[in-house]
Image (cartoon, grey):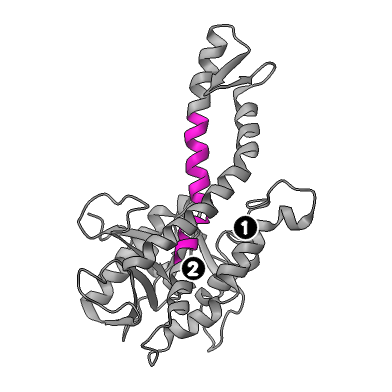
Amino acid sequence: MHDVPRTYLKHHCGADGKGGSTGDMIYSAPVKDLTEAQVRAVNIKNVCLEKDLYTLPGTTTQERMFLENMYNDLYEKSYDQLYGLLTDENQESLSPAQRHDIISFVVSMFLRNRAWGNAYNQLMDETYAKVFLLAEQSGQQSFLMGDQEISIAGKTLEGFQRESRKADRPMVALTGAQKIFELIRIREINDIVTIVKLEFTSLEFITSDNPVTLQDSRQKRPIPFDPANTLSIPIDGKHLLQLRPWAYEHQLETDKIWRTDARGIVAFGTTQINNHYQAGQATHFILGSETGLKSFIQTKDRYKN
């Protein structure tokens, strides 16, 4: 299952250098070895893919694939239409349904990817390591987690952690889906939909396997579920989609697409912020066109604070 869907990734497939499109080929680079030599072309079928990511327990295929089908039906099927609307400069207004779908897509992209599951697994791995060690030191074959007694008889720490991650995966997937619905309701109250377009520049936005970034306009450390955050996601190399919580504070209409053409230093700054955030929060890979990735890698260390 793709935690970053192909319907999103395909719009980041760049040009082939001969006046055509690379079709289903996107370029990627591993964040652990971020050099130009590591930039590779890969089919979008083979990136941001993890087996059984959303699979639930069940006796039927429908039960097991419930979350995967839900993500496809609610957030992926209509994305091409939304992308066309968002990149059409003549499109100025939004129906309530269109606004809901845009906010829903951004929020789903923020919470559905494996970064959240990885963070949960890391926390639980550390917790289990501590209680496992204490149980071993005291000669016990089990320990209490809440009101549940958990046996470690005949198990290694690494094996126990693997079992726990596998057992927790359906719970993590369901919790993520629940949080998506909750955050959509919150973001619909006050968000405006904005598009930043890079004009008259060779600069490009890159994306990643964790593509939604968040910023707090109050210059505080952002809290993931705080509705005061701005959520940003590049929808292709030239367009950045943002949900900004400005409607009431700035008395802005929520039934419009607020468009900004970024040129010069503004375009440079916006691109640098997005691209550094993408590289900083990526789980494994940054993604985009060959030109976009290599340009970022060439300059990534030049503008560090």
Secondary structure under tag 1 reads loop
**Residue 112 covered by magenta stretch:** yes
Task: Give the residue number, with chain letter if any, for mark 2.
Answer: 105
Instruction: Tell me where the magenta segment starts and ends, as one range.
Output: 106-126
Quadrant of res 139: top right
Quick check: 72 above or below 183? below
Q: Does the magenta run of residues contain 83?
A: no
- How far across and how far down the image is residue 228, in percent? 28, 59
- Which residue in the structure is indicated by mark 1? 49
Mark 2 in CB contact with mark 1 (< 8 angstroms): no
- Horizontal side of 101 relative to 297 (left or right) equals right
* Kind of element beneath mark 2: helix
In 3D space, how far apart are the residues under numbered discs 2 and 1 (Cα atoms)? 18 Å
Q: Amino acid at mark 1?
A: Leu
Give the main secondary structure, helix, strand or loop, of the magenta stretch. Answer: helix
Crowding at dot 1, Cα within 10 Å, few <14 / some 14-19 / many 20+, comes out as some
